[in-house]
Image: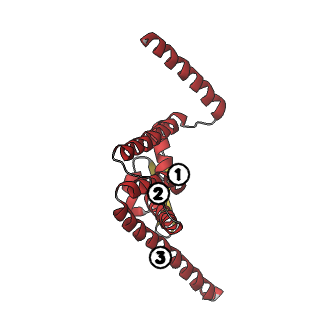
Amino acid sequence: MVRLLRRGTRAFREWFAEQRAEYSGDASRPIAGYSAGLAVYLAGASGVAGMARATGRPSPRLGAGELALMALATHKISRSLAKDPITSPLRMPFTRFEGASAPSELHEEVRASGMEHSLGELVSCPFCLAPWVASGMFTGHVFVPGLTRAVSTIYATVACADFLQYAYAAMQQRSTPPEKR
């Protein structure tokens, strides 16, 4: 049995190496790191589903308002984790500071290779973080809905406030004469 398992593992590794080479070509892509990240995500989602089932928690039915609140909160939390100066210590092991990219946002380049590179791409990309954050928010709705709703409300409010700040700055810019800009 062990011999069969080893043979299967070896065959899978060979197949995976061929697929990676065909996919990546000359580009250096951290496919193994992406695969590990995907495995962690799937294991976490499976674990949460198992815990919910074991504790008899139903899957929440979210209405349009709750979905909108969660979407705004997911946007803001993902963006804060990936771009805010205050969260840069979380990204520091995987990225290099390059400068500011927008008001209160940083531009960082991913460094390292392999698994560290994959993590760097994840933690510095709000689009990449959004599924993880949304999954966390949904998990919160399963196990602690009141707290999750409160956190969602806070971050959705901040997202709306950010939008208003940008709109205000744009209106100010338009109302300032060109010679004073």
The residues bearing labels 1 and 3 have C-alpha atoms spaced at a distance of 23 Å
Q: Amino acid at mark 3?
A: Ala
Q: Amino acid at mark 2?
A: Ala
Q: Secondary structure at mark 1?
A: helix
Q: Residues within 10 Å of mark 1 (few under 14, many from 20)?
A: some
Q: Quadrant of the N terminus?
A: top left
Residue 23: give x, y in percent of width and height. Answer: 65, 33
Q: Are marks 2 and 1 in contact (CB under 8 Å)?
A: yes
Q: Residue at x 61, y 88 (%)?
A: 175
Q: Residues within 10 Å of mark 2 (few under 14, many from 20)?
A: many
Q: Residue at x 57, y 20 (%)?
A: 14
What is the tally of numbered marks visible in this picture? 3
The residue labelled by disc 2 is 82
Q: Amino acid at mark 1?
A: Cys
The residue labelled by disc 1 is 128
Q: Earlier in the sequence, mark 2 or mark 1?
A: 2
Residue 68 seen in the figure: yes
Q: Left or right: 152 with respect to 34?
A: left
Q: Residue at x 49, y 70 (%)?
A: 103
Q: Earlier in the sequence, mark 3 or mark 2?
A: 2
Q: Nearer the viewer, residue 87 or 139?
A: 139
The residue labelled by disc 3 is 161
Q: Are marks 1 and 3 in contact (CB under 8 Å)?
A: no
